[in-house]
Structure formats: structure tokens, C-alpha cells
Image: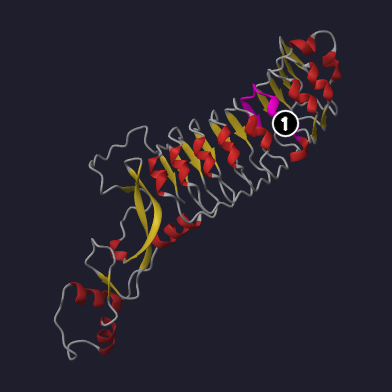
Amino acid sequence: MAEFWGNSQDLSYSELDSFPEFLLEGDQAHQLQSLQLDHNQITVLPRVISAFANLITLDVSNNGMTYLSPELVRLQHLRTFIGKNNYFENESIPKDFGLLRSLEVVNISGNQVTEFPMQFTELHHLKCLYLGSNNIRHVPNEIRNLIRLEILYMGGNKIKEIPAGIGNLVNLQSLVLCDNRLHTIPPSLGQLTNLKSLSLHHNDISLLPLEIVKLDLIELSLRNNPLVNKFIKDLVFQPPSLLELAGRSVKLNKVPYSQEDLPPTLLEYLDMAKSCINPKCKGVYFTSKVEHVKFVDFCGKFRIPLLQYLCSPSCSTSSPHVYWSSESDTEDESVPVNRMKKVLLG
């Protein structure tokens, strides 16, 4: 059932299978500023949409829509366009979509877009862009033009690489790149000084750039990446064998011995001793060793896994997920509210 409040028209869930042309009667089209057509069966947004010259918000999501008329670009006052959960492909988006200069919010998540629409890089007033759950494989460096962007959602695509130009989005507060095929992220991400939330889970990331420590994040999600999976696995290493423990005890305590003092197996084992490569550790190891994760100071208080190095289990810290910085000038255990609250590793 249609509902009309002043300059807003809500026709969502109205079982419409075509554009409601009765809205063209009288001056109603000219007066409308908000039009909700979501959750119907309207497969085409026709050229008559240009009659709604003062429209500010248009929602055509969940319609099975496949086509947007080029006349859509005549809506020069349009600030919000929501077209999520349809069947839009790249060809469905008008070539002159970039002429919608007033647009601040665009949501076409849940469609069939395979390439980042270049038209969107011309929307210089854009603040929120949602492109999740498509089939996007490539992000152009021209994304650097969207300098007013505050929210960028590109989770659930097939993106393998993020261009360095993303570092130009200095107003970005939330960046969602989860559920893609990323192997790394560009060092330029460290330039996003206003970024508060970064979602990178479910990718193929094995290494993070050191520049990420410059960020002042509230939330960072890294779970289900090779970097973190390896880290979690290493935390659950098997305890050394009795032979290993005996050998370490002899070496660490510099116990004097002769061939008559120790069993042959232990004597032979002692020749295999290796010094721990951790310069702060004086211990040794034999066969029970782990590839450990090096943690780098993050946000002045937390440490995140950035690199890996070989170390003995005796050098492992007992705090598995968040590490205090031992190199910081302050050892205050109170965490300021503007520091990271969540580090989602596993």
C-alpha cells in the first residue's frame, strides 16, 4: 500500500511489476524529494524518471532490476541512490552516471558488477560507496579522486590488489575489504589518518606493511588470513620431548659431562643444539622449534603480527592475541578510549 508524506512517497513492498506512472499525475513528480520503490518486481527504471527533477533520495533495491535509464542522470539534486540486491551489470549503469554531481551515497551491493564502475570516480561529492557482494576483480587507481569518501565497502568481491591511490582518501573512516583475494595491502594505507575501522578478514594476506602502525584504528579485523592462521597455529606448539628438555637443561646450565656420564642418545643429541636467534634469549633448542610472529607497536599500545621469524618456544610470550609494547616509553596498562578496542585475529 502506497504511503505519501508531503514530499516523500513510499511504495516499497507494493507488489509492483512496473514503474508507477500514476506518480506523474499533477505536480506530484515535481514535488517528490524521496521515492522508495524497494522490494517490488520492477525490472526496468524507465526514462520517465527524469520527471522527478527534485528527487533527493531514490531507493530501487530488491527488485530484480536489470536496467537504469540514461535519463537518471537528469536528477541533478539526487544525493542518495540505493540499488542493492538487483541484477545490475556494468552495462546497466549509465555511461554519464558521473554527471550526478550531488550524489553523496551510492549503494549497488549485491549485484553482478565485475569491474569498478569508472563513472563513480567522477562523483567528487561522494561520501559513502557500497559495492559489496559483486564480482569486482580490479580497483582503478582513479579511486584516488573520491577525496570526500568516508565509507568504502567492497567486501565480498574477487579483488586481488588495492591501488596505491587509496591513500589519497584522507577522509575515509571505514574501509571494508573482507572476503576478497588480497595478498597484501599498499603501504599508502598508512596515510588514512582518519580511518577508524579496517576489515581485512577472509583474504590471502600473509604480510602487512609497516606503515599500518601509523593508523589510529578502533577496530581491525584480520581473521582467516594466512598471516593470522599461522600465528594462531604457532601459539599451540607441542611441548618439547623429555630428550629435548634434558638437552636444553645441560646446555643452558652449562653442566660439565663426559661420555660416561650421559646416555649415548643424549650425547649425540647435544651436538645438534642451536642457539636461539632472538638476541634477548640465551636459550637453545634442538628439534622442538617454532616459527614465531614478530609483533610491531600499533597505536602506541597494541602490537599486531607483521613479520615472522624463527625462535624457540621458550621465547614465546604467554599473551596470545594482544601484546603490550615492551619498547614503549610508558607501561601504563590503561588503554585510552581512542585507541584500538578490537583486534580480531581469530
Of the 4 image quadrants, the one containing the N terminus is top right
Q: Residue at x 35, y 52 (%)?
A: 295
Is residue 184 at least partly visible in the picture? yes
Q: Amino acid type of disc 1?
A: Ser
Relative image position of residue 203 (x, y in whole percent): 55, 52
Q: Nearer the viewer, residue 249 or 42?
A: 42
Q: Nearer the viewer, residue 1 or 341?
A: 341
Question: What colour scheme does the image use?
Answer: secondary structure
> In the rendered view, would you say 133 is above or below 295?
above
Q: Decide: is 292 above or below 179.
A: below
Q: Determine the residue positioned at 38% across, 40% down.
A: 214
Q: Is residue 1 visible?
A: no
Closer to the camera in the image, 242 or 304? 304
Seen from this angle, which residue lies furthest bottom? 260
- In the rendered image, residue 344, in percent from the top left (x then y), is placed at 45, 46
Residue at 49%, 40% in the rendered image = 198
Q: Under tag 1, what secondary structure?
A: loop
Q: Quadrant of residue 126?
A: top right
